[in-house]
């Protein structure tokens, strides 16, 4: 699948969602939503301008909303360091990038605040085992972190997810 837009391209808003081998392109908060558990497997993420890839809007610690990017490839034409992996739309934003290739389009800070709002104490922005020029962690913001192990798709989508009607395991 191809999801092409500018701002707010893909709305991962509620429920369990799986995106595999897809191209998602945009510039400002182009993967966004509030309550979804969304897994992105082997997706190409293209930044077409300065901005932010994700804007997770988890507003409550009891909501299990999270976006996980596994084996993704981030690239773009917007220039070196012009794109952030994400910013918190709401106070409990949760995003993980793991086992992914992060191109030089990714800003060395990795993550940003929401329009200067520095309330990041409950934000969960993590990375694990990424590669490429955008994966260097020595300048990452203080409210992000590194994991010691990858998260599995079952941990996010639940046991037996692969037998759901909406899952085609040929793409995993």
Image (tube, rainbow, N blue to C red):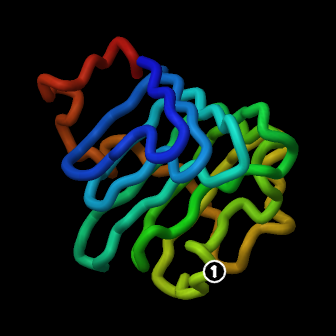
Please identify the quadrant where the N terminus is shown.
top left
Q: Is residue 103 left or right of residue 74?
A: right
The image shows residue 123 at horizontal and vertical percentages of: 50, 75
Q: Residue drawn 68% across and 35% down?
A: 48
Residue 16 to residue 110: above or below: above
**How many numbered circles are shown?**
1
User: Could you tell me which secondary element the residue under label 1 belongs to?
Assistant: loop
Q: Residue furthest front?
A: 6
Q: Residues within 10 Å of mark 1 (few under 14, many from 20)?
A: few
Q: Quadrant of residue 20?
A: top left
Please identify the quadrant where the C terminus is shown.
top left
The image shows residue 144 at horizontal and vertical percentages of: 64, 71
Q: Residue furthest top?
A: 170
Residue 90 to residue 39: above or below: below
Q: Is residue 54 left or right of residue 46?
A: left
Q: Residue drawn 77% across and 65% down?
A: 109
The image shows residue 62 at horizontal and vertical percentages of: 23, 76
Q: Residue drawn 78% across and 50% down?
A: 82
Q: Residue drawn 32% across and 75% down?
A: 59
Residue picked out by circle 1: 116
Q: Residue furthest left?
A: 165
The image shows residue 60 at horizontal and vertical percentages of: 29, 78
| 38 or 159, nearer to the observer | 38
């Amino acid at each position: 699948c191809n999801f092409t837009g500018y701002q707010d391209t893909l709305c991962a808003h509620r429920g369990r969602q799986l995106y595999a081998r897809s191209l998602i392109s945009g510039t400002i908060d182009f993967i966004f939503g509030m309550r979804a558990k969304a897994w992105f497997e082997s997706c190409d993420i293209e930044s077409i301008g300065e901005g932010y890839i994700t804007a997770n809007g988890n507003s409550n610690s009891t909501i299990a909303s999270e976006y996980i990017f596994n084996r993704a490839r981030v690239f773009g034409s917007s220039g070196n360091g012009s794109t952030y992996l994400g910013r918190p739309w709401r106070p409990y934003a949760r995003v993980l990038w793991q086992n992914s290739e992060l191109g030089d389009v990714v800003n060395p800070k990795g993550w940003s605040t929401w329009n200067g709002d520095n309330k990041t104490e409950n934000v969960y922005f993590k990375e694990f085992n990424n590669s490429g020029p955008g994966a260097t962690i020595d300048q990452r913001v203080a409210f992000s972190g590194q994991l010691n192990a990858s998260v599995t798709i079952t941990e996010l989508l639940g046991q037996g997810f692969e037998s759901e009607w909406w899952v085609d395991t040929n793409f995993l």
